Image: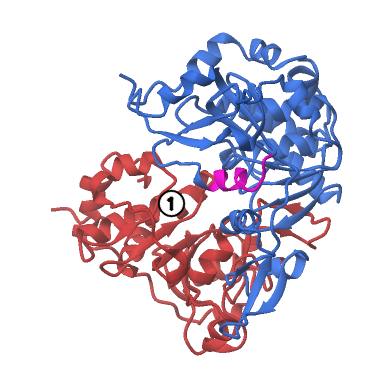
Chain colours: A red, B blue
């Protein structure tokens, strides 16, 4: 049988699937369409379905904001309501933003100064609460230089501070903050020692130079040698293509 | 026993209650669900100025009021048009400094109404530490809890002069019912109506007072939520398709074609071409004397298509 080659979206869905432990509850935020919808709703939705079909049959999602996705994934996802955010009942959140910095602070409020900004964005929505209370957060974002800045113009989602691993606890936030920035090129994580975004994996066909070029924050968080992201197994690819998203409506092929 | 007061009035009379400089809470959710648009259009027609608007999360109604120069301040978590992009009129107004914003996360707008409804001086929360919301929203104060000796942020109670809501059905005395739609119930928004008796309610249909009770059980197999009791309703107005172009859960769908046209006009103005936006206001707002004139413009064919009949009707 011919070996199946995963698409970039399938690689990302599998990374999210592997991040989810059995019994965990995921929360997707509001999406606006286009690539945000793909990164921030469809990829994690398929990731959750994949986790349920493989190693985490009891994981669930609180809502998806996408009736289309719920219809396509059907019983492969489980939607629950009434998880208590404030008592840590959400394990993994997904958020996107206009700016993220090296500590994982996020901004969806404004570009430029707060008063008379150069661009007024939509506003904080639920992002402050995601980053305060969810046990961990995956930041899913389009990889453009303007999205990766040294310092965000407005902190609407709190990342890690420059105090290391205890910084969030010290300011009184119960969640552990961002665990991953996932883009269409690569994945950053936040190692315990520094809590600074560090390039962890690149997808096949992406070079470290391309990531450097498209990452607006300081490059020394990018090691010289970065491994390729772990690829989904043949069975995982088959599940996505034959059972979860047979018509490629969610993840373009 | 004196007869209960009739609350029915015209849209123009209802909108006249809102004076320049008032604070109003616009009930509605996300960019285009359940906004009291017919009322909002009438506010624009009456050229109300310097409004402060409180909303959970919003899009179309705040953007329109910003675009017509009616707004001084907005207190909410979000103003956007979803797949139609940023809310251009709101953007222009905030970027120019004409409108100021008090930022609140989506889940911390309704607690401000709890505080008011429970007669509390503030509502304590602990999810804002480290955000710039604390830096720029001067109405949120820091405190130390006398119980556990740890810090909290104190949200100010919401004190709207008026709460405005569009609902499916009500009676002439101001009792109002809502559908509980699939995946949606207006419980958040109803908290806003509980903090005041100054509720301005527009409904798709007015029924006589002695008939509203028959809608309370599941007459059409849909669940109705008895929402606003008559004593909390100041006035009630009949406005069929009164949420157009936004949706009304279980009744009408959003008119995405219209919203696309609207978003385009706002974007053109943001880019310096004010003509399209002026044309929009002249045609759909100032050019209509009443809500019925507006519906005529939108057209029967379009409105018929927006009817949501996919529910559980017998």
User: Which contiguous range is marked in magenta?
Assistant: B188-197
In the image, is residue A4 above or below residue B149?
Answer: above
Residue B219 figure quarter:
top left
Q: Which residue is mark 1?
A: A41
Q: Position of residue B232 (x, y in %)?
A: 62, 38
Q: Position of residue B211 (x, y in %)?
A: 47, 19
Q: Check the picture and name the quadrant holding the C terminus of chain B.
A: top left
In the image, is residue A193 above or below residue B103?
Answer: below
In the image, is residue A197 above or below residue B70?
Answer: below
- Left/right of residue B68 with respect to residue A213 in the rendered view: right
Q: Could you say which is closer to the camera, residue B180 or residue A9?
A: B180
Residue B150 figure quarter:
bottom right
What secondary structure predominates along the stretch shown in magenta?
helix
- Left/right of residue B5 with respect to residue A6 in the rendered view: right
Q: Position of residue A72 (x, y in %)?
A: 30, 41
Query: Does any portion of residue A90 appear in the rendered image?
Result: yes
Kind of element beneath mark 1: helix
Q: Chain of mark 1?
A: A
Residue A48 figure quarter:
bottom left
Q: Position of residue A186 (x, y in %)?
A: 46, 66
Q: Could you say which is closer to the camera, residue B284 or residue A208?
A: B284
Asked if the magenta segment contains residue B192, the reply would be yes
Q: Could you say which is closer to the camera, residue A221 or residue B4?
A: B4
Q: Residue at x 62, y 53 (%)?
A: B117
Q: Residue at x 63, y 59 (%)?
A: B115
Q: Residue furthest left?
A: A1
Marker count (numbered): 1
């Amino acid at each position: 049988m011919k070996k199946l080659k995963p698409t970039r979206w399938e690689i990302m869905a599998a990374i999210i699937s592997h991040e989810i432990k059995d019994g965990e509850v995921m929360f997707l935020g509001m999406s606006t369409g286009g690539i945000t919808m793909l990164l921030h709703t469809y990829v994690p939705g398929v990731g959750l379905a994949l986790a349920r079909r493989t190693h985490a049959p009891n994981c669930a999602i609180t809502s998806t904001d996408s009736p289309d996705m719920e219809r396509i994934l059907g019983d492969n996802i489980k939607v629950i309501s009434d998880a208590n955010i404030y008592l840590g009942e959400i394990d993994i959140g997904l958020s996107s933003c206009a700016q993220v910095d090296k500590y994982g602070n996020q901004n969806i409020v404004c570009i430029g100064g707060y008063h008379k900004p150069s661009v007024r964005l939509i506003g904080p929505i639920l992002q402050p609460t995601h980053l305060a209370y969810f046990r961990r957060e995956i930041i899913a974002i389009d990889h453009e230089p303007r999205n990766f800045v040294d310092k965000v113009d407005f902190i609407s989602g709190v990342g890690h501070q420059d105090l290391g691993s205890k910084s969030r606890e010290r300011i009184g936030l119960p969640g552990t903050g961002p665990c991953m920035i996932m883009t269409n090129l690569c994945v950053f994580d936040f190692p315990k020692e520094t809590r600074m975004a560090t390039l962890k994996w690149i997808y096949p066909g992406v070079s470290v130079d391309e990531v450097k070029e498209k990452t607006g924050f300081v490059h020394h968080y990018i090691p010289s040698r970065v491994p390729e992201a772990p690829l989904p197994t043949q069975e995982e690819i088959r599940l996505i293509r034959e059972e979860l998203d047979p018509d490629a409506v969610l993840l373009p092929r | 026993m004196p007869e209960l007061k009739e609350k029915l009035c015209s849209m123009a009379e209802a909108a006249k209650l809102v004076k320049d400089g008032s604070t109003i809470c616009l009930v509605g959710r996300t960019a285009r669900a359940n906004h009291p648009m017919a009322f909002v259009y009438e506010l624009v027609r009456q050229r109300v100025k310097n409004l402060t608007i409180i909303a959970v999360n919003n899009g179309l109604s705040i953007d329109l009021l910003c675009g017509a120069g009616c707004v001084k301040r907005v207190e909410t978590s979000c103003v956007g048009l979803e797949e139609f992009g940023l809310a251009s009129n709101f953007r222009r107004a905030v970027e120019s400094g004409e409108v100021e914003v008090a930022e609140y996360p989506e889940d911390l707008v309704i607690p401000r109404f709890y505080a008011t409804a429970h007669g509390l001086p503030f509502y304590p929360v602990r999810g804002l530490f480290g955000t710039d919301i604390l830096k720029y929203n001067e109405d949120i104060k820091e405190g130390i809890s006398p119980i556990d000796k740890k810090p909290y942020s104190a949200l100010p109670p919401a004190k709207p002069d008026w709460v405005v809501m569009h609902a499916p059905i009500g009676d002439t005395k101001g009792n109002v019912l809502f559908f509980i739609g699939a995946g949606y119930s207006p419980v958040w928004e109803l908290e806003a109506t509980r903090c005041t008796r100054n509720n301005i309610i527009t409904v798709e249909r007015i029924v006589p007072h002695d008939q509203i009770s028959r809608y309370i059980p599941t007459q059409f197999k849909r669940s109705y939520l008895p929402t606003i009791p008559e004593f909390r309703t100041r006035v009630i107005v009949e406005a069929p398709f009164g949420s157009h172009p936004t949706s009304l859960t279980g009744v009408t769908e959003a008119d995405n074609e219209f919203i696309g046209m609207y978003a385009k006009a706002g974007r053109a103005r943001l880019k310096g071409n004010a003509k399209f936006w002026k044309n929009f206001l002249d045609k759909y707002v100032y050019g209509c004397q009443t809500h019925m004139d507006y519906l005529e413009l939108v057209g029967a064919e379009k409105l018929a298509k927006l009817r949501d009949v996919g529910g559980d009707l017998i």
